[in-house]
Image (tube, helix red, strand yellow):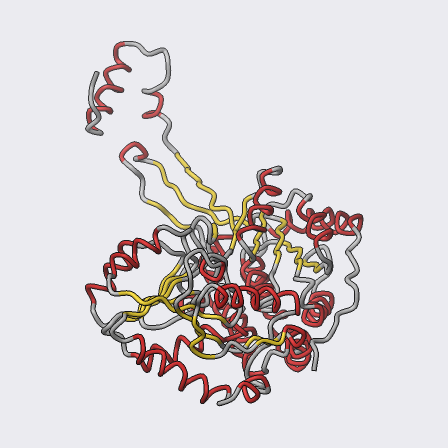
Amino acid sequence: MNAPLAAPMTEADPVQMRAVFDAQLETALRWRQSTAAQRIDRIKRLREALLANRQAFYEAFALDYRKPEAEVDVTELMPVLDEMRHAIGRVKRWMKPHRVWPTSLMIMTKAWVQSQPRGRVLIIAPWNYPLNLCFGPLVSALAAGNTVIIKPSEMMPSVSAVMARIIRDIFPENEVALFEGSLPTSQALLDLPFDHIFFTGSPLVGKVVMTAAAKHLTSVTLELGGKSPTIVDASANLKTAAETLMWGKFLNGGQTCVAPDYMYVHASVKDAFVEECRTILAARYGQTPAEQKGSPDLTRIVNPRHAGRVASLLQEAVDGGARVLTGGEVDVDDCWVSPTLVDRVPSGARIMEEEIFGPLLPLVEFTDLDQVIADINARPKPLALYVWSHTQANIDRVLERTSSGGACVNHCLMQFVHGNLPFGGVNNSGIGHAHGHFGFKAFSHERAVVQSSFIMLVRLFFSPYNAGRMKVIKASLASLKLPMP
């Protein structure tokens, strides 16, 4: 069965997009005064529509890339529903002005931080988790009181169509609108002076989005990616590590921005770890290549072009001397690459340089943890880092001496799911945060407000700077322990 071919993509009309953008201005200004109850109502209506369309989503995901129903539940519906539950229960608290104590120079004033909606925001979502990474940020934007225009990926036409119908059914366009299309639609939207852009995708496209935003000095949240390393040291529980990592890597066909992308395994446990991985993969997906290819529990690569790209990464590595430890089966026309582990990857191979975004996992044998840390630090900062160890000194050394957007110890992917943690990258892997209160803050402007009922003291600093006022200024400097001239 070949992957279904989508109909040619129809681009959204730039004139219509501009009209909707303009129409959202009046709403955005009005929504600055929206109450918590009004924002909660919008999220609840979205939640009801999402639940009512569960079956439609199951069918759409099956059409777009044969994603199993269980994975739709676990990776698409559950995170969005949890985001909704979290926001509904806390948005009233998040909206309250946050009082701050006066500093020594601000005595006899009061001050607070007021969270204001940014205004009109744009959400550009990727194809790998099209529902999760579209509606998740939408919940945060609505909680913060913004109007929204959404651009889903053209590579998920069936899922996008269901989302578009939901948005049309519950929101007028001057509140929330969704435009389907490919690159021209994205470019037309990026030409508009939004108040904030939330983009999820590759670092390469993230740079394009940031460049477009700079023309209007638009703030951005960039959820990007990169090569996320995993370390399995000699003290790790190999069975648990293998069970968890074989899930985290091959979930969604390996098309996950926080998936383990390459793995350092201590030489003393490598063979035992690989054997655990082989056993788990056979038990979950089948003993033979044919059984694995027929498994209903493995999501396909999104399209033949991406399958070909993943296959070329594997072939180049093998041609250079890499060894396939398990898997290695490829059918590009059927968007199929089997769950594959490789080692002995030659230096400079693209599989160790590019984000794989597919079911390939290179293993690197190590004996020196300091060298592993040096190798990680020589690369762009990743979105995630995973360390498997029961030696606290090793865990501390890795966490203290590396940088990544998030990290997990003896688990993987959970930093994305935890609603009370900020999710985001650092430098090449992203800018800003999402989820829960951090998502609310991403779509809010934190306005600083100072209120004073006493002006007499500050008058002592007004010109003209006579001897008496200079004496007050010098005494104030001395009280702050600043060096005197």
Could one spot residue 42 in this view of the protein? no
Foreground residue among 158 and 419: 158
For this view, does 75 lie left or right of residue 305?
Answer: left
Q: Residue at x 31, y 78 (%)?
A: 271
Foreground residue among 413 and 94: 413
Question: Which quadrant of the rendered structure holds the N terminus?
Answer: bottom right
Q: In this view, does 264 lie above or below 283?
A: above
The quadrant where residue 389 appears: bottom left
Q: Residue at x 62, y 65 (%)?
A: 127
Q: Which residue is drawn at 58% across and 82% down?
A: 68
The quadrant where residue 104 appears: top left
For this view, does 152 lie left or right of residue 400?
Answer: right
Residue 176 rendering spot, x and y as whole percentages: 68, 59
Q: In this view, does 332 lie above or below 31?
A: below
Q: Residue at x 32, y 25 (%)?
A: 457
Foreground residue among 106 and 128: 128
